[in-house]
């Protein structure tokens, strides 16, 4: 074998090894990172045509006790109490939900706070039934 063919083969092997390292060692996306005691706000606008308006907030089941979940009415600034908390057969896999009954045509703010002193990576889904 010549020097050129040896260099070519070794460069191909190096590229394959680098690609493998990047592919396997870089963590996959599994949600947003929440720093210790960090709070995030999400705005939810309910349609005026939604007659039985509800807001669903889904949290990863393994972090259900790590987050403080509150929904605020933007007009009165009051905290709404959840209509239902838990999980059922319609809940996405590995999710824990909070369901709030809300008024149509209003805007609400969901505040999700990490109650722990550690960084949490979690996917949180907020949606209405429209």
Image (spheres, helix red, strand yellow):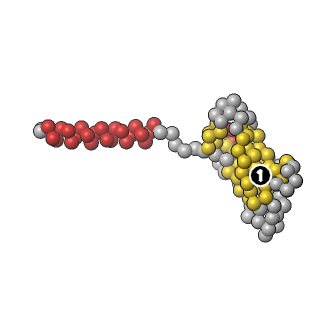
With 39 as the anchor, is 101 left or right in this view?
Answer: right
Where, quadrant-wise, is the C terminus in this rendering? bottom right
- Residue at the location (65% across, 39% down)? 34
With 76 as the anchor, is 94 left or right in this view?
Answer: left
Q: Which quarter of the picture shows residue 29?
A: top right
Spot occupied by residue 70 in the image (x, y as percentages of width and height): 79, 46
User: Compared to 83, does 53 lie above or below?
Assistant: below
Q: Identify the secondary structure beneath mark 1.
A: strand
User: Compared to 48, does 85 lie above or below?
Assistant: above
How packed is label 1: few (under 14 Cα within 10 Å), some, or many (20 or more)?
some
- Residue at the location (72% across, 48% down)? 41
Name of the residue lying farthest toward the top: 117
The residue singled out by tag 1 in the image is: 109
Spot occupied by residue 14 in the image (x, y as percentages of width and height): 30, 38
Spot occupied by residue 3 in the image (x, y as percentages of width and height): 14, 37
- Residue at the location (58% across, 44% down)? 30
> From this viewpoint, is residue 15 visible?
yes
Q: Which quarter of the picture shows residue 105?
A: bottom right
**Mark count:** 1
* Residue in front for this viewpoint, 38 or 3: 38
> From this viewpoint, is residue 86 visible?
no
Where, quadrant-wise, is the N terminus in this rendering? top left
- Residue at the location (18% across, 38% down)? 6
Q: Which quarter of the picture shows residue 107?
A: bottom right
């Amino acid at each position: 074998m010549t020097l050129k063919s040896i260099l070519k083969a070794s460069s191909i092997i190096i590229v394959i090894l680098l690609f493998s390292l990047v592919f396997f060692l870089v963590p996959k996306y599994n949600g947003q990172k929440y720093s210790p005691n960090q709070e995030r706000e999400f705005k939810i606008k309910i349609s005026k045509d939604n007659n039985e308006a509800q807001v669903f907030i889904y949290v990863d089941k393994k972090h259900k006790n790590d987050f403080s979940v509150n929904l605020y009415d933007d007009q009165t600034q009051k905290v709404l109490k959840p209509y239902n908390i838990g999980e059922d057969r319609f809940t996405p896999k590995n999710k824990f939900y909070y369901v709030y009954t809300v008024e149509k045509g209003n805007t609400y703010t969901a505040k999700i706070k990490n109650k722990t002193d550690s960084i949490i990576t979690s996917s949180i889904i907020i949606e209405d039934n429209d």
